[in-house]
Amino acid sequence: MSFSFPKKDLIPEEFQISPKHQKRYLINGELRTWVGKTETVLSPIFLETETGLEQVVLGSYPSFGEVEALEALDSAVKAYNQGAGEWPQSTVEQRIVAIENFISLMQTKRDEIILFLMWEIGKTHKDSIKEFDRTIEYINDTIDALKTMEKDSSKFITEKGILAQIKRAPYGVVLCMGPFNYPLNETFCTLIPALAMGNTVVFKPAKFGVLLLEPLLECFQKAFPKGVISTLYGDGAKVVSPIMESGNVDVFAFIGASQTANIITKKHPKLNRLRSVLGLNAKNPAILLEDCDLDAVVPEVLAGSLAYNGQRCTALKIIFVPEKLAEPFLEKYLTLLKTWKRGMPWEKDIMLTPLPEEGKTKWLTELIEDAVTLGAKIHNSKGGMVTESFMNPAVLFPVSKQSRVYHEEQFGPIVPIVPYHNIEETLEYVRDSNMGQQASIFGKDAKTIGLLVDRLVNQVARVNINTQCQRGPDSFPFTGRKDSADGTLSVTDALRAFSIRSLVAAKDEESSKEIIRKIVETKSSRFIGTETKL
Ligand code: G3H
């Protein structure tokens, strides 16, 4: 299937976009107007004009300096007020009311957010809808999990003469930074649980996917008390460094590259005080076994390796195929890949789209050239061919252990296929990799799969059988070993990650019980209580 950028007047009316020059930013509950320097937002989409291809300018957003960055932090610190602020002192019921209000307001921005998802990061219309709706579902599930958590912790327990009530309390100020590939969903998968547990938040959108969050600023402002959520825009090094160096961030929630996470984390002057919730690099292997059913495996591996152009942390980023199966696997994979439509995110049934990262196609080309120099061939016609921000997927076989793409995470449309003779070679790869998020095994024999599972579960955090790697369902733990993650994110785990178990304890004797009874009766404590109206 061929690829070309469109002419402006051929874009359907409902998908046309007007530039947005974002002036608003949220600090201390105020929607302020920005008058300083701005960052330009370029779309991954180019348009065909009479003078050639022109990259679409989507707009601009504020570029903070150190002063504004510290102001955003200061408003979060004040709102937390050492745990005495309105938000950390609010009841779970009050927090749920605020979050539910936020959901209703957010629903009104659905179409605008979906449109910007397509234009800012090149995500298909179908997947942009999915990202929005999945995020709403995640927030609703978070509310349900919070209710259950509150109910479960509402009773007192007695153990060895000590009476106690154990609950969860917030940590303090959270810095949330999401990734460009899921700029809404993955940002909210940390931001919402952090808020739900009573923390205050400073959040910085990813480098791409900034404007799509602008409509939500007024929703945040209306739904939450002042300072509970503030925004940070601009160059990461300039705005994140002073915030971390201040020592006032209690939790660093970040989904992105492990190198970046390390640089930012190290800036905190009190490392033992800083909690981290990190989702980092991954290089998940697909391991095909000799008895696998290729007709079923190929669609799964193709989707796993190339959905959203391979720009998913959970994507299958290296495919191990038994030597004997290599030829039929390649043939079926290439045949199916040919049917995948390339084009613009709004086109029907489109699968492959332009890439948002500037310079990415050049970097991917270097990876391809390196693999080819070391013996791999590009097996699909036009594989690796670049048109501005679009790269036609490159299916590489046989990829050698020496090549960069064998080790490095491509996060793009390159499919490295490695033939193996002995299954131990695949386990060696997993063992030697710096990453350890997930793996997928494809086969039929229960004994072989069982043995492989036992080896892999001690190297990665999720082993998938005859299915691609993925994050969902969101109630399942999502984490990684080695350099792939720190902390676990599921709906419930995220609530735990942003809170610490805190308890009130007393001797199990009448005088203490009397005090506690009175506290409960008179509701003189928010924390202590034996009933919930949830
Ligand atoms: O980029 C990493 C995402 O968490 C992957 O999520 O498996 O639902 O695409 P997904």
Image (tube, grey):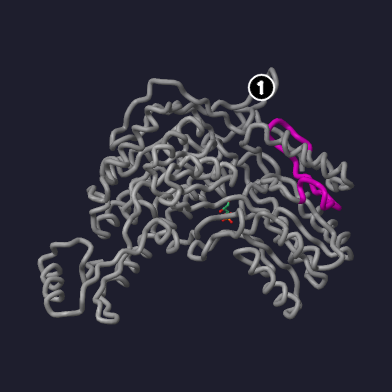
Please say whether residue 104 is visible from this viewpoint: no
Residue 255 position in % (x across, y down): 53, 48
Residue 13, horizontal then vertical, whole percent: 53, 34
Q: Which one is in front, 251 or 344?
A: 251
Quadrant of ligand 1: it is: bottom right
Q: Measured along the vertical axis of the image, is residue 300 above or below residue 53?
A: below
Quarter where residue 421 is shown: bottom right
Judge left or right: residue 85 versus residue 453. Answer: left
Towards the viewer: 124 or 509: 509
Residue 529 coordinates in the image, percent (x, y): 20, 68
Q: Which residues are magenta?
A: 385-406
Residue 367, percent across and down? 77, 41
Q: Secondary structure at mark 1?
A: strand
Q: Amino acid at mark 1?
A: Thr
Q: Is residue 429 above or below residue 403?
A: below
180 versus 296 height, above or below:
above
What residue is at 78 percent from the left and 49 percent from the top?
338
Viewer-proximal residue among 54 and 408: 408
Residue tagged by mark 1?
Answer: 49
User: For the residue with label 1, is its CB less than 8 Å from the closest atom of ligand 1?
Assistant: no
Quarter holding the N terminus is top right
- Answer with left or right where residue 56 lies relative to residue 338: left
